[in-house]
Image (cartoon, rainbow, N blue to C red):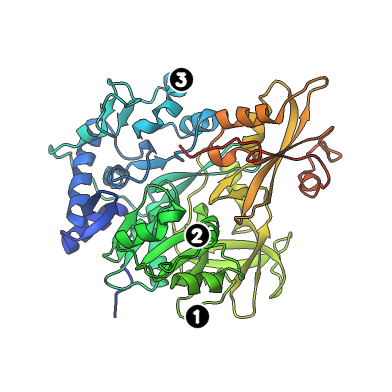
Amino acid sequence: MFRAGEEYHELATLVRAKARRNGAKAALRFEGRELSYRELDAESDRISNGLAAAGIGPGDRVAALLYNTPEFPLLWFALAKRRAVLVPLNTALKGEILRYELADCAPVGLVIDPRLWDAYAPFREGLRIRKEWATGPGDSGDAAPRAVARFGDLASDRAAEPLAPPAPSDPASILYTSGTTGPPKGAIIPHEQMLRTAYEIGRRSRLAPTSVLFTALPLFHCNAQEMTALTAILNDLTAAFDERFHATTFWETAATMGATHVSLLIAMVNVLFKQPAKPSDATHTVRTALTAGTTRAVWPEFERRFGLTIIELYGMTECGCTTLMNPPDAIRVGSIGTPLGFVEADVVDDDDQPVPAGTRGELVVRPRAPFSMFLGYLGKPEKTVEAWRNLWFHTGDFVTRDADGYYYFVDRKKDVIRRRGENLAPYDVETEINRHPAVFESVVVGVPSPLGEEDVKAFVQLRPGASLAPRELFEFCAERLPFFMVPRYLEFVDEIPKTANQKSQRYVLRERRGGTQYDREALGIVVRKP
């Protein structure tokens, strides 16, 4: 019987132990390059030596603006060996949000893909990050200045002074999540959480000795890190990555990678399902899809058409990329599953009292083992206390639970908008819209999307006497916001409805009907990924 993973508690020991066991076997597969287990360990050792020579040590933070390339895992494991902390940032960030996150985490170093240099350059002088490394060969088309050091030159064979392995409680990474009424929050993720989550995912993923786990999700998210990379490494398997999701070639790419398992978000499921049917739809190698948000209507037909089994799950950054998951031998269509072994879950009302089976309430979770959830929000103790109320972490999501302990997602309680796999805060979009000189105030809400999840809609109140063309405001947003935050819809209103204490009545606008709505895509304004 296949061994469903082993328990490790920190990343440095994991990669060294697996290199001894698996040697030349492929650990990580990218387009055009593989890293064997031995290479992953040896090359991350050399990068770790270079980081030590550059003065990077325990507790130091190094930010990363990197796509799905081999440099990401090499940096990730090298930092673990230095007991330093990786801060991976969303590659779509630009403008004030990027500046804020870099300033907030205060890294001593930054590793950046040259294709993203132009987004970083406007803030470079103000941030004054001590060490910068750019990936890539540094050719004439490279946006990074020639004086910036190359990541490839960081590797050194001169061994650094040995360090004790990280403790399970040591921070391994800081992952930014969207705030609802303020700027993004950096969730501090300990080594134990990353590996405990991956271990439990492996136990419910129908793995075999020849399994290959494939994703087109970005490595700066916990999903690709824990569900794909670490689950594969823990189980002596191969993880494969595409740089980005391409619906028209997804199954062909998966087959080329030898994938048996894929990780999909609801927007990906729906886009794949909407592709024209082909005789080859089920001729790939994938047999299991780990998904989040699949509807009852699509689930059985998706399985039939693409010749695989869906294992639906639920998770969030703070409590593991997967917190609940269907048992592989007792899957219930429509359910997000049951709690994984490291967490306890419940459904509560607004007074934090448990509700009966079948009753809607907020999902709350807490760890069963030390350091198996996040350590808190960086520099925001009040937000940490707010999230942990009455000894439970409050997810902000409404669910129901049946008599057998299976959970079912209902809706979001908090004002985070979920678009194409990204969580975004209305606050961030509103802040940028309000910078336009013609805008007095704005409110941003999520509205149903035909692809599942939500699209972004902005309600805008102009300054007295001001005028503003919809196209101008859409283009203003596209210049300043990540692609996934740019509103799809826009509606001008005479006045933003307020409560007695002058808070915007977001729910009133969300339910508003009959206004004149402008559609960015109908206006021909296309916002593309970087």
**Quadrant where the C terminus is found in the figure:** top left
State the separation of the CA atoms marked 2 and 3: 43 Å
Image-based side of 424 in relation to 519, left or right: left
Of circles 1 and 2, which is in front? 2
Q: Position of residue 360 (x, y in %)?
A: 71, 67
The 10 Å Cα crowd at callout 1, few under 14, some 14 to 19, many 20 or more, is few
Residue in the image at 66% along x and 25% along y: 435
- Between discs 1 and 2, the one toward the N terminus: 2
Residue holding disc 2: 272
- Residue nearest the viewer, comparing 523 with 399: 523
Residue holding disc 1: 330
Which quadrant holds residue 472? top right
Kind of residue at disc 1: Ala
Secondary structure beneath label 2: helix
Q: Position of residue 245 (x, y in %)?
A: 44, 51
**Quadrant where the N terminus is found in the figure:** bottom left
- Between discs 3 and 1, the one toward the N terminus: 3
State the separation of the CA atoms marked 3 and 1: 54 Å
Secondary structure beneath label 1: loop
Q: Is residue 297 visible?
A: yes
Kind of residue at disc 3: Gly
Q: Residue furthest left?
A: 158
Numbered tag placed on residue 126 in the rendering: 3
Q: Position of residue 375 (x, y in %)?
A: 48, 50
Kind of residue at disc 2: Leu
